[in-house]
């Protein structure tokens, strides 16, 4: 996968287009979707800090510690709607994969050629 937790991404389509934030979580398969059933390996979504906020109306449940009322939280965004922001050139970019001499996998910005951790 070309995007990991901790990356900065930019939303490239949808109503949050242009927003940037740090990836808090990457959700795959059944975790990412709302439907029950078989996990879909292509269904990958990311939670981006401060982007795609929704107001969740949390009702009181049996758990006393549950926060109730209106809670603002990030909704998952499909991975195809975000692009990695290159730390080198600061632009949303596609990434290429290659292997370093020590065998470690590297990501490389297709725009400026910088390697991305
Ligand atoms: Zn770059």
Image: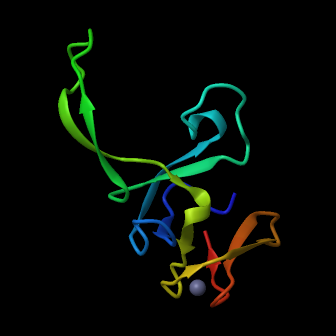
Q: Is residue 38 above or below residue 77?
A: above
Could you say which is closer to the camera, residue 71 or residue 111? 71
Q: Residue at x 26, y 9 (%)?
A: 62
Ligand 1 falls in which quarter?
Answer: bottom right
User: In this view, which residue lies farthest toward the top?
Assistant: 62
Q: Is residue 30 above or below residue 53?
A: above
* Residue 54 x %, y %: 31, 48
Could you say which is closer to the camera, residue 36 or residue 4? 36
The colour scheme used here is rainbow
Relative horizontal placement of residue 71, taking residue 96 as reference (left or right): left
* Residue 96 x %, y %: 74, 75
Q: Residue at x 26, y 14 (%)?
A: 61
Relative horizontal placement of residue 1, taking residue 82 as reference (left or right): right
In the rendered image, which quarter contains the C terminus?
A: bottom right
* Residue 40 x %, y %: 72, 39
Q: Is residue 69 above or below residue 79?
A: above
Relative horizontal placement of residue 61, taking residue 77 as reference (left or right): left
User: In this view, which residue lies farthest toward the bottom?
Assistant: 112
In the rendered image, which quarter contains the N terminus?
A: bottom right
Which image quadrant for residue 70? top left
Which image quadrant for residue 82? bottom right
Q: For the image shown, how many numbered marks are present on the structure?
A: 0
* Residue 60 x %, y %: 21, 18
Q: Residue at x 66, y 46 (%)?
A: 43
Which image quadrant for residue 63? top left
């Amino acid at each position: 996968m070309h995007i990991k937790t901790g990356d900065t991404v930019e939303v490239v389509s949808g109503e949050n287009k242009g927003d940037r934030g740090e990836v808090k979580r990457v959700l795959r398969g059944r975790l990412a979707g709302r439907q029950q059933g078989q996990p879909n390996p292509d269904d990958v979504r990311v939670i981006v800090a401060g982007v795609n906020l929704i107001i969740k109306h949390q009702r009181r449940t049996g758990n006393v510690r549950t926060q109730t009322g209106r809670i603002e939280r990030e909704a998952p965004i499909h991975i195809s709607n975000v692009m990695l922001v290159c730390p080198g050139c600061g632009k949303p970019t596609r990434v290429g994969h290659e292997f370093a001499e020590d065998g470690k996998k590297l990501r490389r910005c297709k725009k400026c050629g910088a390697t991305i951790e």
